[in-house]
């Protein structure tokens, strides 16, 4: 098994993009099936079907609505839901948060299940908690979701019975409520960070004067701590009425009527409540002519941002005319976003990023929202640019080319969805039916929708699109908010900008948009095709391997999982670990600087237009031990994607002053944001303790940025993607070799050889990271200033896997990490109710990734909790791991872990990315010696061998072998705690006792990173809580 970082993430950042999609049956060139799709003759006044198409739909005598549809993707799985048209907005003042508490209690105890037995049952059949069993509460609704296997008799019926329990049998006892309060409180505390405070503030401003402003689903801390169980039970009985509910079942079952009968069996005998169903009141949101303004100062903010929101009544699509208007509205936001992106890539731009969207906020209201992230002290300039661009559209509209690009992008999306109509995920279809029940969105079927779009899109004019710019008027219930880490902008500044732009618009003093010239072809001159030097078939994995004349190795696998998808990754050994300390900072910035300039020979803003209507994405990554490029495209756009790869290898990126200046500004803002973030000091210290004080693990400081040499950075990036003979490329998807192989030979085989090329690195040549886990026990508390108290805990344990048992132990690590996560979750959340979630992470890249050396790394346990409970919870974790090492897990525990792993494996076998990753791992494996088929087989046999041997005793011995035994002899604990204020410190000094302070600590798993402020501000994660 390899130790290298995964290289098959969908491409992002630095890449080039198009649309996305869903699909059809035979392996045809993309577009043939769609081009033959007939247009429809429709009247604009024609009504769309009120009942959903393609689903068994009905209503039981007791009022419950049901939706059932057979769908084969994924195989032997069913996506189930129970939706309730009730959310937090119906709560009374002393009930704030109760709707969300009910949702938590549903998984805790019902009339048939106690002590989270529902969770345990679902996990025992492979439905992992969180991923396959979840729920959400929003202002207007509550939704329970399950994704369950249906390959064994009785599983589907039992899963539907669980939803039936949720509908009317949730047990709300004092004991149940007390046990769940801690988890809800931790979810509440976790939301009281910078992002949560900003979202809450914006939400209150948006809905001022409405009950929605005061009914965020998480509720208040006081209610969560003190609400009596009688009040929770009363809310449940009052609002959970079958007439307000619907059950959904979409999955791989042959007989939909049999599933309908199951629903009738489990729900039909439930009599409607004796009292009439509650009338769900309407909660109006008042409009306002004058804009509302806010200058929000958040000392922990990840950056400066501007949000402009314009509210309007939510519209319903009832007729073809309504549908046409919705298409024109989408074209408006698409065309506007193209402009906003181009502005962000100008010299000295007013913002780093900016986007526009329409979003349904609450049942009666939707909003047009435009958000930007900008440099500090730049919010006023950003706001002016945003308002000015919308005003420019109102005055001058969009050009025909802009409309054509937006139309092409939307046509590409619907074409992809149509081609993959028979391969749509069951969860996607289920969510469509949910929207029909909750919001009366029409469900007309992808075939008819594709016909409608193909008929209507070509005839939507620029004038139709431009009219939607009027919805962005500052007199249309507009809310303007800036967020800054330090106060710079004032309300007067914001009002002055609005007045200035409105005056310019009234005076017609805003000039038209100045369009760029766009090249026609990505590759100006087609390269001379390469040839195939060697070709090998690998029937065990259904793949073909070719060595090209320029030395590049190609492995392709044809699949029929998605008709409109081809994915690929190329990798070569040699990455950032090869660099000296003097080079590291400059070269680590290479990808960022080069990406801003344009790694495919064109500036990103130009390339965006060149790719309009195509679904082709390519991105790059330079990691510790290797560099890679990854792509995702439609089969018909494979040529475009391969052209991008050719351009990547043949473009010499040269730094230009303006682009470098923008990158450095963005980097500075990111560093300042990290320094404001309470978690940064904690993450840095945890990394230093666990991995050493090497420059490789140190954060970049402002002083480091000043040492960056842009020429060296771009030169390093150019050298990373220069020699084709160093790269192995794996391609998976709907490939027709008779079409694809000639394209591969032309654009990959046509990449020129490098003269006097240095022999490519092998994994044995690489320099390992300077990693050394502490040999003693380390406990440390990191105190950081915080607006509101947060606490995160990380326990780390060193891992050493011996070379001789590597093939099997690598699989044991996967099973062990899932076992630890499951058992610690059971203890900390289900038993003690003190955490919201637990994450167990694995790092195995801590030494030179050679073929023969041992593998070193660590396993970490991460969670957030009440600061006062952190030390006690650390002890609980150590006790649980000690118990597992000394007594072993139960037979039930092992069977559950095996089932979860098997179900994930079965799902993966139906996905292109899963196969791409597995083939890449075979090439990167230490047992690989030239035959990828044999390596794949060895890895597969290793997995099966471990599965067959995985008994409680085997798991116990693996825990003793992989982790320090006993676990208490070697570990680290790092905790993030709030830094007390001077007054609190003084009070603590006065009350200090000889007991002192226990330095046991804690840390978080999802320490991943930077908050994307501009987007998250208006996204309503605070108004929709998943549990």
Image (cartoon, rainbow, N blue to C red):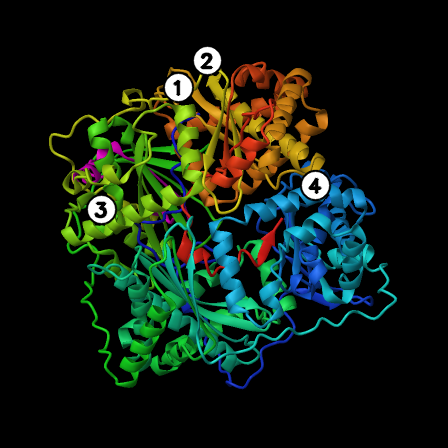
Whole-percent x, y for residue 63 in the image: 79, 67
| Residue 59 in sight here | yes
Q: Is residue 959 above or below residue 783?
A: above
Q: CA distance from mark 2 to mark 1?
A: 21 Å
Query: As rendered, which of 128 and 75 lies closer to the eye?
Result: 128
Residue 724 covered by magenta stretch: yes
Q: Nearer the viewer, mark 3 or mark 2?
A: 3
For residue 493, which quarter of the picture?
Answer: bottom left
> In this rendering, is residue 588 above or below 335?
above
- Read off the residue under disc 3: 594
Q: CA distance from mark 2 to mark 4?
A: 38 Å
- Ranked by sequence position, the earlier of labels 3 and 2 is 3
Is 745 or 942 nearer to us in this picture?
942
Rate crowding at label 3 as few (under 14), some (14 to 19) or many (20 or more) other CA atoms within 10 Å. many
- Asked which secondary structure carries label 3, the reply is helix
Q: Which residues are magenta?
A: 715-737
Q: Comparing marks 2 and 1, which lies closer to the viewer?
A: 1
Q: Which element type, helix, strand or loop, lies under badge 2? A: helix
Image disc number at residue 772: 1
In front: label 1 or label 4: 1
Residue at mark 2: 804
Residue at image position (22%, 61%) is 346
Point out the tag, 2 or 4, that comes first from the N-terminus. Answer: 4
Q: Earlier in the sequence, mark 4 or mark 3?
A: 4
In this image, 722 relative to 762: left or right? left
Q: CA distance from mark 3 to mark 2?
A: 42 Å
Q: CA distance from mark 1 to mark 4?
A: 38 Å
């Amino acid at each position: 098994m390899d130790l290298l970082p995964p290289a098959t993430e969908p491409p992002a950042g630095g890449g080039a993009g198009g649309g996305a999609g869903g699909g059809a049956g035979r392996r045809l060139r993309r577009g043939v099936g769609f081009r033959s799709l007939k247009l429809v003759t429709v009247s604009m006044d024609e009504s769309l079907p009120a009942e959903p198409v393609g689903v068994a739909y009905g209503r039981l005598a007791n009022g419950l609505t049901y939706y059932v549809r057979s769908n084969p993707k994924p195989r032997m799985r069913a996506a189930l839901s129970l939706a309730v048209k009730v959310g937090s907005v119906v709560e009374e003042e002393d009930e704030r948060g109760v709707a969300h508490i009910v949702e938590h209690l549903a998984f805790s105890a019902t009339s048939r299940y106690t002590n989270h037995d529902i969770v345990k049952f679902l996990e025992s059949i492979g439905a992992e908690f969180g991923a396959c069993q979840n729920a959400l509460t929003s202002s207007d609704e509550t939704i329970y979701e399950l994704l369950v296997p249906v390959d064994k008799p009785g599983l589907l019926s039992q899963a539907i019975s669980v939803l039936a329990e949720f509908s009317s049998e949730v047990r709300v006892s004092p004991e149940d409520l007390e046990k769940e309060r801690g988890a809800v409180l931790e979810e509440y505390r976790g939301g009281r960070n910078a992002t949560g405070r900003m979202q809450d503030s914006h939400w209150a401003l948006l809905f001022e004067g409405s009950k929605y402003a005061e009914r965020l689903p998480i509720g208040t801390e006081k209610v969560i701590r003190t609400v009596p169980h009688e009040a929770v039970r009363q809310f449940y009985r009052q609002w959970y009425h079958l007439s307000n509910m619907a059950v959904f079942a979409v999955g791989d079952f042959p007989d939909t009527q049999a599933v309908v009968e199951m629903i009738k069996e489990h729900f039909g005998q439930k009599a409607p409540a004796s009292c009439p169903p509650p009338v769900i009141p309407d909660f109006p949101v008042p409009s306002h002519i004058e804009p509302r303004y806010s200058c929000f100062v958040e000392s922990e903010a990840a950056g400066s941002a501007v949000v402009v929101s314009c509210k309007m009544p939510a519209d319903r699509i009832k007729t073809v005319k309504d549908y046409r208007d919705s298409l024109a509205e989408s074209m408006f936001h698409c065309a506007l976003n193209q402009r906003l992106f181009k502005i962000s890539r100008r010299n000295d731009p007013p913002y780093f990023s900016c986007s526009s969207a329409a979003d349904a906020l609450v049942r009666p209201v939707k909003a047009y929202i435009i958000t930007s992230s900008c440099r500090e002290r730049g919010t006023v300039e950003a706001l002016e640019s945003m308002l000015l661009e919308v005003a420019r559209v109102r005055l001058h509209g969009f050009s025909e080319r802009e409309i054509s690009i937006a139309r092409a992008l939307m046509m590409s999306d619907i074409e992809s969805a149509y081609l993959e109509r028979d391969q749509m995920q069951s969860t996607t279809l289920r969510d469509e039916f949910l929207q029909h029940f909750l919001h009366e969105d029409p469900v007309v079927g992808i075939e008819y929708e594709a016909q409608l779009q193909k008929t209507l899109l070509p005839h939507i004019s620029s004038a139709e699109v431009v009219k939607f710019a009027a919805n962005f008027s500052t007199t249309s219930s507009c809310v303007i908010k800036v967020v800054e880490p330090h106060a710079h902008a004032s309300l007067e500044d914001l009002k002055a900008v609005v007045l200035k732009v409105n005056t310019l618009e009234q005076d017609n003093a805003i000039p038209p948009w100045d369009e760029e010239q766009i090249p026609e072809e990505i590759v100006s001159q087609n390269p001379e095709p390469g040839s195939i030097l060697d070709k090998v078939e690998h029937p065990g994995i259904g793949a073909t391997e070719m060595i090209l004349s320029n030395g590049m190795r190609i492995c392709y696998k044809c699949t029929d999982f998605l008709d409109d998808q081809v994915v690929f990754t190329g990798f070569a050994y040699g990455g950032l670990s090869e660099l000296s300390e003097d080079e590291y900072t400059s070269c680590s910035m290479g990808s960022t600087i080069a990406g801003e300039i344009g790694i495919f020979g064109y500036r990103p803003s130009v390339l965006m237009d060149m790719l309009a209507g195509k679904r082709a994405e390519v991105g790059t990554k330079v990691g510790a031990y290797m560099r890679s490029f990854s792509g995702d495209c439609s089969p018909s756009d494979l040529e475009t994607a391969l052209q991008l790869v050719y351009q990547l290898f043949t473009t010499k990126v040269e730094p230009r002053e303006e682009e470098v200046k923008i990158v450095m500004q963005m980097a500075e803002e990111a560093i300042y944001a990290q320094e404001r973030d309470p978690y940064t000091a904690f993450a840095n210290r945890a990394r230093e303790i666990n991995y050493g004080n090497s420059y490789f693990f140190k954060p970049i400081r402002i002083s480091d940025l000043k040492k960056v040499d842009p020429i060296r950075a771009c030169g390093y990036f150019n050298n990373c993607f220069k020699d084709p003979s160093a790269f192995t490329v794996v391609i998976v998807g709907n490939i027709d070799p008779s079409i694809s192989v000639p394209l591969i030979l032309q654009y990959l085989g046509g990449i020129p050889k490098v003269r006097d090329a240095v022999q490519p690195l092998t994994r044995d040549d690489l320099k390992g990271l300077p990693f050394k886990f502490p040999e003693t026990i380390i406990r440390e508390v990191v105190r950081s200033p915080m607006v509101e108290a947060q606490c995160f805990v990380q326990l780390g344990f060193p891992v050493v896997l011996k070379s001789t048992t590597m093939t099997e132990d690598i699989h044991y690590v996967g099973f062990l990490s899932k076992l630890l996560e499951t058992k610690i979750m059971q203890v900390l959340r289900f038993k003690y109710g003190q955490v919201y979630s637990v994450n167990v992470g694995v790092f195995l890249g801590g030494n030179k990734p050679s073929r023969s050396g041992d593998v070193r790394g660590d396993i970490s346990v991460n969670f957030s909790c009440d600061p006062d409970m952190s030390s006690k919870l650390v002890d609980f974790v150590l006790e649980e791991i000690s118990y597992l090492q000394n007594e072993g897990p139960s037979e039930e525990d092992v069977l559950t872990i095996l089932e979860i792993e098997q179900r994930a494996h079965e799902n993966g076998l139906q996905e292109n990315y899963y196969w791409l990753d597995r083939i890449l791992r075979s090439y990167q494996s230490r047992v690989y010696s030239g035959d990828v088929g044999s390596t794949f087989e060895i890895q597969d046999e290793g997995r099966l061998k471990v599965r067959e041997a995985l008994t409680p005793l085997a798991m116990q011995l693996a825990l003793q072998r992989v982790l320090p035994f006993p676990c208490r002899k070697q570990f680290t604990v790092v905790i993030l705690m709030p830094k007390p204020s001077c007054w609190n410190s003084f009070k603590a000094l006065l009350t200090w006792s000889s007991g002192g302070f226990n330095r046991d600590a804690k840390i978080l798993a999802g320490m991943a990173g930077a908050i994307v402020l501009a987007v998250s501000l208006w996204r309503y994660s605070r108004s929709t809580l998943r549990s």
